[in-house]
Image (cartoon, rainbow, N blue to C red):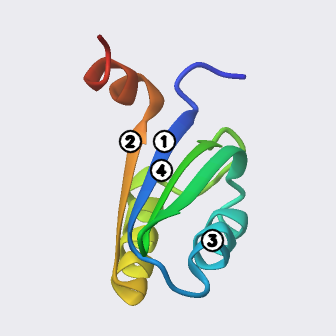
Amino acid sequence: MEEGKRLIITVLGYDRVGIIAGISNILAAANVNILDISQTILQGFFTMVMVVDIAKSQVELSELKEMLDLKGDELQMKISVQHEDIFKFMHRI
């Protein structure tokens, strides 16, 4: 896999129907591959972390972020997108 082609997407908010479908449909339409996904519900709060590959996507990162922001607003969720290297740098021990 090409260096710098992976993103970390985090999602947080109240649990509701259609969260995973809404986000994964946007990613599929942008030709973004989901490499790994972890989600849980803690006392009604939905949390999800996705590792995705954007190597084959023709969508600009800024446009992808905007599409996910709009979906987050629609679902009343907070969706964050970061390059993997930035995420690793921010969360190193």
The residue at the point 67 percent across, 53 percent down is: 32
On the image, the x and y values in percent for residue 19 come to: 56, 77
Give, as a three-letter code, the residue at label 3. Ile
Secondary element type, mark 4: strand
Q: Which residue is mark 2?
A: 82
**Which label sits on residue 8?**
1
Residue 18, placed above or below residue 26: below
| Most distant residue in the front direction | 43
Mark 2 surroundings within 10 Å by alpha-carbon count, few (fewer than 14), some (14 through 19), many (20 or more): some
Give the mark nearest the N terminus, 3 or 4: 4
Q: Which residue is mark 4?
A: 9
Q: Are marks 1 and 2 in contact (CB under 8 Å)?
A: yes
Mark 3 surroundings within 10 Å by alpha-carbon count, few (fewer than 14), some (14 through 19), many (20 or more): few
Whole-Å distance between the Cαs marked 4 and 2? 7 Å
| Of residues 64 and 25, the one drawn nearer to the viewer in this rendering | 25
Q: Are marks 1 and 4 in contact (CB under 8 Å)?
A: yes
Mark 1 surroundings within 10 Å by alpha-carbon count, few (fewer than 14), some (14 through 19), many (20 or more): many
| Of residues 42 and 58, the one drawn nearer to the viewer in this rendering | 42
Give, as a three-letter code, the residue at label 4. Ile
Residue 93, placed above or below residue 48: above
Give the mark nearest the N terminus, 1 or 2: 1
The residue at the point 34 percent across, 27 percent down is: 86
Whole-Å distance between the Cαs marked 1 and 4? 4 Å
The residue at the point 37 percent across, 69 percent down is: 66
Give the mark nearest the N terminus, 3 or 1: 1
